[in-house]
Image: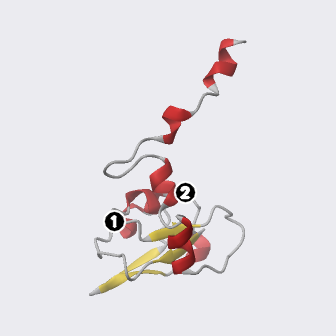
Amino acid sequence: MIELVSASRCIQCNLCVNVCPTNVFEQRDDQPPQIARQSDCQTCFICEVYCPVDALYVAPDADANVVVNESTLAETGLLGSYRANVGWGAGRQKQAQQDQSFHLLKKL
């Protein structure tokens, strides 16, 4: 579930507002978007993937609100981590290229 829009990182591009399939965010003048309907979040991670500055954090547990601390998320590398893991962003490598599970299918 979407838990954080970082005011310090957000560049107010509003991509998250535009790509969210459940209209969770509200665009605001001269401010970062607001999480307006958190309970509507489907934990699809689309907003986090599209954020060009890793200003969003979507917690993987869709059924629970969690308390987040922005500095802790940044220090641990969790802020924008989904985007990094799928390889979106300059200089990032898709982690799927490192997945070796396809070898299991060769044995079938």
In the image, residue 47 above or below residue 36: above
The tag earlier along the polypeptide, 2 or 1, is 1
13 left or right of 94?
Answer: left
Give the residue at mark 2.
44
Q: Residue furthest front?
A: 75
Color theme of the render:
secondary structure
Tell me where residue 104 sits by quadrant. top right
Q: Amino acid at mark 2?
A: Cys
Q: Dividing the picture into quarters, in which one does residue 59 lie?
A: bottom right
Q: Residue at x 52, y 64 (%)?
A: 77
In the image, taking residue 100 as reference, residue 16 lies left or right, namely left
* The C terminus sits in image quarter: top right
Residue 71, horizontal then vertical, whole percent: 52, 79
Query: Is 2 rendered above or below residue 82?
Result: below
Q: In the rendered view, would you say 52 is above or below 94? A: below
Q: Where is residue 42 drawn, in percent x and y? A: 59, 62
Q: Which mark is residue 15?
A: 1
The answer to whether residue 28 is seen in the rendering is: no
Q: Position of residue 96 (x, y in %)?
A: 52, 36
| Residue 9 in the image, given as x and y percentages of width and height | 36, 76
Viewer-nearest residue: 76 or 63: 76
Which residue of the protein is positioned furthest toward the bottom in this rendering? 30
Check disc 1 and give the amino acid type: Leu
- Look at 35% across and 76% down and name the residue there: 10
Q: Residue at x 61, y 79 (%)?
A: 68
Is residue 40 something one can see in this rendering? Answer: yes
The residue tagged with tag 1: helix, strand or loop? helix
Element carrying mark 2: loop
Q: State the residue at coordinates (33%, 48%).
A: 91
Neighbour tally class for label 1: few under 14, some 14-19, many 20 plus, Cα within 10 Å? some
Q: CA distance from mark 2 to mark 1?
A: 15 Å
Crowd class of label 2 (few under 14; some 14 to 19; many from 20; radius 10 Å)? some
